[in-house]
Image: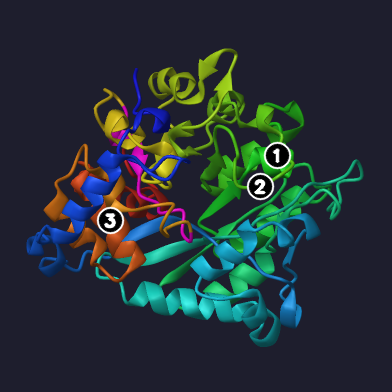
């Protein structure tokens, strides 16, 4: 399978200051009339976004924290800005203010009605306790459960490192709090999904009917990631035990055993009817072409779910201009005119060929327990 590699995308600006082709396209972009059908026909659909991140500084008792390394990294201020806040606002208003802003922004969307807000557990030490020194971002379950319960359009996505000494107790707690899934980033949390010590945790996930949303492939957003744990094949143990596994981002980054991560994931769909993936982050500039190719690959479309990877929805990370090989300039102009990040995300993905069934499947999988695969 061949993907559109960023290095081969000639119309994008180069480090030398931009190609003539890019300059020409940009001038054409400014002059071309927008396709008003898209901007005017934003029907109310109420899709469920199953992949939304938050973070915090621990203000007003949230329990959140970000490592000093992350705080000093230029990325974090951008993440805060993309979430509609700033480090200064979090410090003065508290971390819960971020959830309030998120809910309001989501309420303005015509296309997405609800979102799963993801907690994020950290690395644990040999005693099964949180290792703050090795944890980059920590968003506790209690914070997300409490804050999402205040808003009708937000849902609780829990995160538990299964190597915690009280992991099973925590699993019971988040289930009682209304968690709709468990989220892992194995490379960031230092979890080997193939570790047999996790088997009791997997079995309880099956009993509780909680899906596992696990990042698959290389992790590029955080320093100190152990990318060997992102190998999609490592999810086989959970799948064999009957866990409903959602391999995030269709494993679009990294290589394992000399094989592209996505190529490694592909045959697993045929082996495991309980394996799904989702389309968050697939319109980002570093993943151009992956979504189109995935939709054309037999056996995948009916296993895909909708997610946005919010707040990573900002320019220059994402822009309709990047997708001109697949959508027209007028269509791209109209999408860029949409004010809401979720509406733009849905519109770009629709233009790239994502069918309605994919957008609807997140709701079905999370809330229709008898949903037929």
Residue 308 part of the magenta segment: yes
User: Looking at the picture, does residue 248 appear above or below residue 319?
Assistant: above
- Total marks in image: 3
Depth check: 319 or 217 in front? 319
Residue ID for mark 3: 346
Q: In terms of sequence position, does the residue under pointer 1 or pointer 3 come before the other?
A: 1
Q: CA distance from mark 1 to mark 3?
A: 30 Å
Q: In this view, which residue lies farthest toward the bottom?
A: 92
| Quarter of the figure with residue 145 | bottom right
Circles 1, 2 touching at the beta carbon (< 8 Å): yes
Give me the residue at 23% from left, 56% from top.
347
User: Looking at the picture, does residue 320 appear above or below residue 85?
Assistant: above
> In the rendered view of the protein, which quadrant contains the N terminus?
top left
Q: Which mark is residue 225?
A: 1
Residue ID for mark 2: 222
Residue range in magenta is 300-311
- Residue 124 is at least partly visible in this image: yes
Label 1 crowding class (10 Å Cα cut-off): few <14, some 14-19, many 20+?
many
Give me the residue at 22% from left, 64% from top.
45
Circles 1, 3 touching at the beta carbon (< 8 Å): no
In this rendering, would 222 be left or right of 50? right
Give me the residue at 46% from left, 53% from top.
309
- Residue 54 is at least partly visible in this image: no
Q: Determine whether the residue tagged by mark 1 lies in a helix, strand or loop.
A: loop
In this rendering, would 319 be left or right of 95? left
Q: CA distance from mark 2 to mark 3?
A: 26 Å
Depth check: 17 or 279 in front? 17
Q: Determine whether the residue tagged by mark 3 lies in a helix, strand or loop.
A: helix
């Amino acid at each position: 399978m061949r993907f559109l590699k960023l290095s081969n995308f000639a119309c994008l600006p180069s480090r030398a200051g931009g190609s003539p082709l890019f300059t020409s396209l940009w001038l054409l972009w400014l002059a071309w009339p927008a396709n008003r059908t898209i901007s005017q026909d934003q029907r109310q659909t109420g899709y469920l976004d199953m992949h939304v991140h938050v973070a915090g500084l621990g203000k007003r008792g949230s329990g959140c924290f970000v490592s000093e390394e992350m705080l000093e990294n230029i990325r974090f201020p951008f993440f805060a800005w993309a979430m509609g806040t700033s480090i200064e606002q979090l410090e003065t208003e508290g971390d819960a203010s971020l959830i309030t802003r998120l809910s309001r922004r989501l309420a303005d969307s015509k296309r997405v009605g609800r979102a799963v807000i993801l907690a994020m557990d950290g690395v644990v030490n040999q005693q099964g306790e949180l290792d703050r020194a090795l944890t980059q971002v920590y968003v506790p379950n209690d914070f997300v459960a409490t804050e999402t319960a205040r808003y009708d359009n937000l849902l609780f996505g829990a995160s538990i490192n299964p190597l915690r000494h009280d992991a099973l107790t925590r699993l019971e707690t988040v289930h009682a709090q209304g968690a709709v899934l468990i989220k892992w980033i194995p490379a960031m949390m230092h979890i080997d999904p193939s570790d047999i010590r996790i088997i009791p945790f997997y079995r309880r996930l099956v009993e509780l009917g909680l899906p596992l949303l696990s990042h698959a492939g290389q992790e590029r957003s955080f320093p100190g990631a152990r990318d060997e744990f992102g190998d999609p094949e490592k999810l086989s143990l959970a799948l064999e035990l009957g866990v409903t596994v959602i391999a995030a981002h269709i494993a679009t980054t990294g290589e394992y055993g000399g094989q592209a991560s996505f190529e490694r994931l592909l045959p697993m769909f045929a082996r495991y009817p309980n394996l799904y993936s989702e389309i968050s982050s697939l319109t980002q500039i570093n993943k151009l072409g992956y979504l189109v190719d995935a939709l054309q690959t037999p056996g995948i479309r009916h296993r895909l779910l909708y997610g946005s990877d919010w707040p990573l929805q900002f320019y220059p990370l994402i822009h309709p201009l990047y997708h001109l090989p697949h959508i027209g300039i007028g269509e791209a102009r109209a999408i860029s005119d949409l004010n809401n990040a979720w509406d733009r995300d849905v519109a770009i993905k629709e233009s790239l060929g994502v069918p309605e069934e994919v957008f609807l499947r997140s709701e079905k999988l999370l809330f229709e327990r008898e949903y037929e695969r």
